[in-house]
Image (spheres, rainbow, N blue to C red):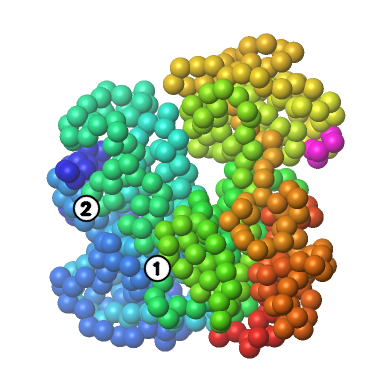
Amino acid sequence: MPPEKDETLPAASAGAAPEPAHDPVQSPRLTDDQWARLLEFGEPEEIEPGDYLFRTGQRDYNLMLIESGQVEIVREPLGWVGEVVITTIGPRSFLGELGILNGQAAFLSARVTEPGIAYRVSEENLRRLMAEDDELCDILLHALWARREALRSGPAALTLKLVGSKASSEFLALRRFAERTDLVHTAIDLEDAVDKTHHADYLEERGFTKADLPIAYVQGEPILRATPGLVADRLGLSYQASTDDFVDLTVIGGGPAGLAAAIYGASEGLRTVLLDAVAPGGQAAATSRIENFLGFPFGVTGRALIGQASLQALKFGVRVYAPCEAVSLTTIDEGLEVTLRDGRTIHTRSAIVTSGAAYRTLDLDRWNDFEGSGIFYAATPLELRQVMESPVVVVGGANSAGQAALYLASNGCPVRLVVRGDDLSRRMSSYLVTRLLEDPRVEVLTRSHVVGLDGDRYLRRVHIDRVGEVEARGLFCFIGAEPATSWLNGVDRDPEGFLRTGVDIPLDALGEDWRRLGREPLPFETSLPRVFAAGDVRRGSMKRVAAAVGEGSSAVASVHRALASVGGVS
């Protein structure tokens, strides 16, 4: 299979490094005292021209401090196009970007051009630095984040290139994975009007067929019929355990409850792993605007909130793996064993299940045909690009549906909000109800149902009882979800599948293990000792972002008590 041809990069941009203006965030000027403190966390080594401090594709590379000498950051050759020098780094600077905090494979290389001395900061020392020196931690974190953002619009974005059709749910899944995991990437839609001429013969020129789509190019090498899992494996984002790995806490699910649990656990000294079957964020990442979350008087998008929480998790040393789907959880002699979809296992002393819920669908003909090509379960910029100011239908009567309707309307889409009940305020916050009823771009249809779908490869029309057929480029479905608990065996749950915890667990569901422990389940603890639940998956939860964050962080207090009763934390 041929490597990818980099047709989007002008030939003049290859070769010598550009001379960018100094960015005080990406390249902070450190004081003598700050630099001296930073060097204390590193081990010195001599560097010579031609040495590589890290290479593209290398996993678990280190933060490098340049005391003297010079290093250039290079995007290595992609297919038929030569290398590109992104920038140069001189004395009293450091090398690295955000991926260094999560074990992501390097997508650029660092090559020495002038001799000098560099200090290598091990992962252990980097974690110690971020825990012990708040000032240096803030400087590093801002710089690593800013560098990641700056790389999005340059040649580095071509190190991960996604190619497919917007009519493909598989291509949409790839793009959602890349965006939610904050990967530097480029996405090419072969059906986009702007790209049609340029990419008319894209597949034929490369010897591919439509059956090979979507294609992910990693460092110029193609992955055919790419999935988020295959890309994650190549990038070092899937779980890689050694035989002696044993963590204190495994959080299963990366929504607000899971992120909060992981952050609080890691910040309090627990070796913590966070798993998500798709990518961190859960349903909150799909929320266009959250206005009742403490501390955000002007509202915040779900994507922004989850992005900052994910960065916070990395700051405290949480290892985030996605997509990593847990398929079973069992008790072993020393703790618990979590088995992943690919057969790999995680040994852990405790677990918090925050796996959330799966979206419900409507029982309609051709529903599966239009998933990803007109039917969506989120309203974010990714989905907005699919409907392009066209009329849409939003289905649902709770906050998520109301927020989606307002978001789509504010971005040029005429919206019909279809609500089964006759009282919009029964399940929706009053501020949303008021805005919806006052917004001329939103038509609220109560006591209504979607009864049919029509279109070719894309959704074109929606049939609504009491209204008839309406034009619709998108149908956004927010009719609730079912708890994602079917993978858990032997854990007590209510008739709807939600996990019972604490005093809510009936006595007859507590077996011999509890009698040996000599205690009752702690708050948020399930019927399986040292397995906890928080967020939407737990019976009685409020189903709000703020409540999920509170539950996730509170569950960690019970984790500490449970671990203390069986020998504490490693």
In the image, 229 versus 106, the foreground residue is 229
Q: Residues within 10 Å of mark 2 (few under 14, many from 20)?
A: many
How many marks on residues? 2
Residue at the (53%, 37%) spot, across then down: 381
Q: Amino acid at mark 1?
A: Gln
Describe residue 259's horizontal placement relative to residue 62 as left or right: right
Q: Is residue 273 above or below residue 443?
A: below
Disc 2, SS:
strand
Q: Amino acid at mark 2?
A: Val
Describe residue 502's horizontal placement relative to residue 394 as left or right: right
* Mark 2, residue position: 84
Location of residue 524 in the rendering, given as x and y in whole percent from the top left corner? 74, 67
Looking at the rendered image, the quarter that the N terminus falls into is top left
Give the magenta part as a residue range: 425-429
Describe residue 134's horizontal placement relative to residue 187 as left or right: right
Residue at the (75%, 33%) spot, across then down: 397
Disc 1, SS:
loop
In the image, 17 versus 8, the foreground residue is 8
